């Protein structure tokens, strides 16, 4: 299964989501080789480090994202993915504005999990507490995501 998380800069939210998903999938005893889990940004450059506060926030979960390098979202990444999960509504809207054919596989993370409030707020420029809250929120939803993926896998 190929999943792409999308945010704006790919230095804060989507790298957290990517790292949480890899970590939780492994902890559930799943074979990580069965999954391709990446993240990308709608408006970024390739090769930027994760923001310092994101690195610190995830270190509290014993997750190390110091090696993360940002990547710009591409049409190829979207075409190739099974599921594209965006951090905000705008990210989804931008993708579908250019690539409307992929409507069936692009969702906000919260929408995909049946929530009404669609955005994971952008912590960019905020203090460490804001990043810790973002990490907590993303971790919560990624836990739910794993439950959903594994449930669907069992049923199929
Ligand atoms: N605001 C930044 C870009 C940016 C926006 C959001 C951001 O956070 P995230 O990686 O969660 O989208 C990171 C970077 C700029 O001034 O260019």
Image: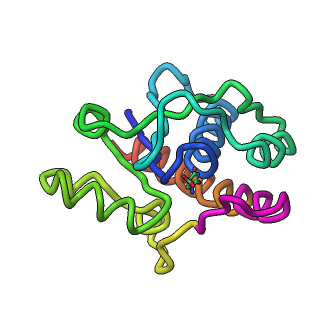
**Image point (37%, 40%), residue name:** 73
Question: Which of the 4 image quarters holds residue 78?
Answer: top left
Q: In the image, is 61 to the left or to the right of 114?
A: right
Q: In the image, is 133 to the left or to the right of 71?
A: right
Q: Which residues are magenta?
A: 121-135
Could you say where residue 13 lies in the image, as x and y percent from the top left? 60, 52
Measured along the vertical axis of the image, is residue 113 above or below residue 26?
A: below
In depth, the one of 18 and 141 nearer the eye is 18
In depth, the one of 41 and 152 nearer the eye is 41
Measured along the vertical axis of the image, is residue 70 above or below residue 111?
A: above
Could you say where residue 27 lies in the image, as x and y percent from the top left? 70, 34
Could you say where residue 128 lies in the image, as x and y percent from the top left? 84, 57
**Image point (59%, 33%), residue name:** 48
User: Is residue 127 within the magenta segment?
Assistant: yes
In depth, the one of 88 and 3 nearer the eye is 88
Q: In the image, is 98 to the left or to the right of 135?
A: left
User: Is residue 28 within the magenta segment?
Assistant: no
In depth, the one of 116 and 65 nearer the eye is 65
- Most distant residue in the left direction: 101
């Amino acid at each position: 299964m190929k999943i792409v998380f999308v945010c704006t800069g790919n230095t804060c939210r989507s790298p957290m989501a990517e790292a949480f998903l890899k970590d939780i999938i492994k902890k559930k005893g799943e074979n990580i080789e069965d999954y391709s889990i990446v993240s990308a940004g709608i408006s970024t450059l390739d090769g930027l480090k994760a923001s310092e506060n994101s690195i610190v926030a995830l270190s509290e979960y014993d997750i190390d994202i110091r090696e993360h390098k940002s990547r710009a979202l591409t049409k190829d990444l979207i075409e190739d993915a099974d599921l594209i999960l965006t951090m905000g509504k705008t990210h989804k809207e931008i993708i579908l504005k250019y690539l409307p054919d992929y409507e069936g596989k692009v969702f906000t993370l919260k929408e995909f999990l049946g929530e009404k409030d669609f955005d994971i707020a952008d912590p960019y420029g905020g203090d460490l507490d804001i990043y810790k809250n973002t990490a907590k929120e993303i971790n919560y939803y990624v836990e739910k995501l794993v439950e959903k993926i594994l449930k669907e896998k069992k049923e199929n």
